[in-house]
Structure formats: C-alpha cells, structure tokens
C-alpha cells in the first residue's frame, strides 16, 4: 500500500548539513534501486552525490543504459524527459524540483514550430525540402515533431555530424531553438553566413522574404541561452591582451563572435576533457556556466593550471540551481518510503516519435 508522500514543507527549512546527511541515509536505503545523474552545471552540494555525470549526450546514453528502478535527474526538465523516453517503461524518471526548466527550451513551442512549418509550406514543400533538427534542449513534443517529419535531435557535442545527416536527406534544415549552436555548426560545415537566415516566430513568415527562404540552407530559430549570451568578445580580448599564452574555450551556445575568437568550442564534457588533457601550467578562459568552471578550476589547480570564468558578472543556470540538497533529500526519502514524487512522464503518443528522433541521433553520433 502506498502511503502519502512526505511534504516538501518539512524539508524546505532543513539546514544544509542535515540535508546532506539525509541524502546519504536515503541513498543507503535505496541502494542500487536509484541512480543519480548530474549535469555538469549542477551545484557542488548536489553534484557530490552523483553516480554518473556528463553532458546532454552522455547523460542520455547513460539513462538509456541504466538498470536502476529510479533515475533521479539532477539537471533540467528536458533531460529528465529524455531519460523517461529512452528508459524502459518500468523505470521511473524523477526531477527533484519541477521548476528546473530551461529558458532556451521554452523559446520554441510546438504551436509555434507547427505554424512555422505551415508558413514555410507557402514557399516550398517542407516535408520534402526541410529536415527539422531540434537541439536536445527542447520539450518532448518538439522531438516528437522531428520524429514525425523525418527529423532528428542534436546536442552540443554532435551538432555538425547531425547536420550532415540532415543534409544527406533534404536540402534545407529548420534548426530550433538555439540559433547560436545552429549558426556555429553550419559555419563549421562551411555554410556561408548569407545562407543561414533567422526565423523570428513572432513575425509573419518568420520576418523573412520568400527569396531569403529559398536561398537559406539553414533556417535558425530565434532562440538563445540567457546564461551563454552573457559572454562577450571584449572579455576574450582583455584576457588575450593580459595573457598572450592563455587559451580560450567556449560552449557553442555562446554568440558567434565569442566562438570564433575561442581556441576551442565544445560541449560541457569536451570543455572539461580539453582542460584536463592540456599541459600542466596552462591558463584557460572558459565560456560556460559558473558551477562547472569553479569545479574544473579546483580539479586542475594541483597541476598548476589556472581556469578563469569568462563572465564579467556571475552567470549560473538559475533553473538548474533550483535542484538543491533539500529537494534531493526530499525526493530520495520519498522514494525510499515507496512514494514516487516529481515523476516525469512523457505521454506515449509523444514518447514514441520523440524516441525515433533521439534514436536517429544516437545512431548518427
Ligand atoms: P551540454 O550538452 O554541452 O552539457 O549542454 C547542455 C546545456 O544546456 C548547455 O547550456
Ligand atoms: Fe538551458 Fe542555458 Fe540552463 Fe543550458 S545553461 S539548461 S541552455 S538555460
């Protein structure tokens, strides 16, 4: 018999130290029944409880390979949705705080993408000429849209490869929601800038003329990450002036000019491995979220490496930050008591086509 879930009110006021102890105790009770997956942006007081860590691609693979009954996702909503879609039906995907969303993912909705598809059909035949490609930072219904329209999902670590997959099938790509990842990946493939057009979903025909649409090879949704848009070229220029031997690495969600001025561009996992594999004593400027940069700086300082944060102001992923030790303790204690809280369930009519688009990605990357 399932007993009533323990209310979060009892955990809200928990002192941090007590929350840590209760996480450890609940984990011990759950044993191998639960696995804790943590994205690299997760705050340190939660990250330390991770069984497995990674970027979005690695975490989606890990979720699909896990045998645990409960997949506790310390990340954001779309990541827990992917875990639900790729895991077996009897497995349960849980997001410790349902308010942990992704503001970039919210910039494209199914209604707006369907409207774009309809409007594009006044100029060309989208289902024959355009492959829809959604960044994994998107809701499950958009992944389902891609699955149903011959499209695919990509992540920050495989986007150019996925674009190649898309162009092997149709002449054009509609890329949503992150314009920067789409633009950078297109540029790396050699697509000229004037063949990448911005689709503004609030304007008729995306604010484009039929001629611009006919010319575009990639139509970029007007979306962006509020964290990565804080990084600026001037910050790199200042760093290079001060440390001519320093190296710069950025996430592809950064603006084009930031990526272009960087020595390397890559996913969170790539940023970490590149810095870890660099020569002792290297100084790095890193353009991605602060929790990752702080942790990385700490992990490599014994090799004399210096890791600096690119931002002039503190920029954290405030939504991911919502998963705190109190929410993790509450989630795990409930699971240990037999109460499933904050389960993320993608309805079957969305999960099936979304899985198609995700499996195309996993096979192509
Ligand atoms: P990664 O897949 O590189 O971890 O990126 C996810 C993300 O949301 C970056 O903002
Ligand atoms: Fe979304 Fe940006 Fe947070 Fe990544 S850092 S999860 S893109 S809001």
Image (tube, rainbow, N blue to C red):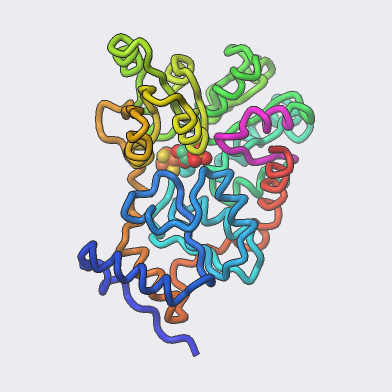
Q: Magenta segment range?
A: 150-166
Residue drawn at point x = 37 percent, y = 40 percent:
299
Q: On the picture, is 297 further left or further right than 213?
A: left
* Residue 167 position by quadrant: top right
Q: Is residue 195 in the magenta section?
A: no
Q: On the picture, is 8 further left or further right than 71?
A: left
* Residue 286 position by quadrant: top left
Residue 111 appears in the picture as rendered: no
Residue drawn at point x = 43 percent, y = 44 percent:
40
Give 204 or 136, whichever is nearer the viewer.
Answer: 136
Q: On the picture, is 282 further left or further right than 177?
A: left
Image coordinates for residue 68, horizontal then vertical, percent: 57, 67
Q: On the picture, is 254 further left or further right than 208?
A: left
Residue 12 appears in the picture as rendered: yes
Give 253 or 17, whichever is nearer the viewer.
Answer: 17
Image coordinates for residue 271, horizontal then vertical, percent: 47, 32
Q: Is residue 158 in the magenta section?
A: yes
Image coordinates for residue 260, horizontal then vertical, percent: 48, 16
Residue drawn at point x = 46 percent, y = 35 percent:
272
Image height of 267 relative to 41, above or below: above
């Amino acid at each position: 018999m399932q007993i009533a879930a323990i209310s979060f009110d009892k955990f809200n006021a928990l002192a941090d130290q007590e929350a840590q102890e209760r996480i450890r105790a609940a984990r011990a009770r759950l044993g191998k029944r639960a696995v804790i997956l943590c994205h690299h942006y997760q705050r340190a007081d939660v990250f330390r409880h991770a069984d497995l860590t990674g970027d979005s691609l690695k975490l989606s693979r890990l979720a699909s390979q896990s045998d645990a009954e409960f997949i506790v996702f310390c990340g954001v909503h779309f990541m827990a949705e992917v875990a639900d879609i790729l895991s077996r039906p009897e497995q349960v995907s849980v997001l410790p705080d349902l308010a942990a969303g992704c503001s970039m993912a919210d910039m494209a909705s199914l209604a707006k993408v369907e409207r774009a598809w309809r409007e594009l059909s006044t100029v060309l035949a989208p289902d024959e000429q355009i492959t829809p490609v959604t960044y994994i930072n998107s809701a499950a219904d958009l992944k389902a849209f891609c699955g149903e329209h011959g499209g695919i999902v990509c992540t920050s670590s495989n986007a150019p490869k996925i674009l190649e997959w898309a162009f092997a099938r149709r002449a054009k790509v509609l890329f949503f929601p992150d314009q920067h990842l789409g633009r950078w990946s297109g540029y790396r493939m050699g697509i000229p800038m004037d063949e990448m057009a911005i689709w503004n979903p609030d304007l008729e025909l995306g604010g484009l003329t039929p001629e611009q649409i006919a010319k575009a090879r990639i139509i970029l949704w007007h979306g962006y990450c509020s964290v990565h848009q804080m990084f600026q070229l001037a910050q790199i220029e200042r760093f290079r002036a001060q440390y001519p031997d320093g190296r710069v690495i950025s996430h592809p969600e950064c603006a084009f000019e930031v990526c272009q001025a960087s020595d390397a561009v890559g996913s969170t996992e790539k940023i970490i491995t590149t810095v870890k594999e660099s020569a002792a004593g290297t100084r790095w400027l890193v353009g991605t979220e602060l929790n990752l940069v702080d942790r990385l700086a700490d992990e490599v300082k014994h090799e004399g490496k210096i890791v600096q944060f690119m931002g002039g102001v503190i920029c954290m992923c405030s939504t991911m930050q919502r998963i705190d030790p109190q929410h993790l303790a509450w989630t795990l204690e409930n699971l240990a008591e037999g109460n499933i809280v904050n389960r993320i369930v993608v309805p079957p009519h969305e999960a099936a086509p979304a899985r198609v688009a995700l499996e195309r990605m996993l096979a192509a990357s």
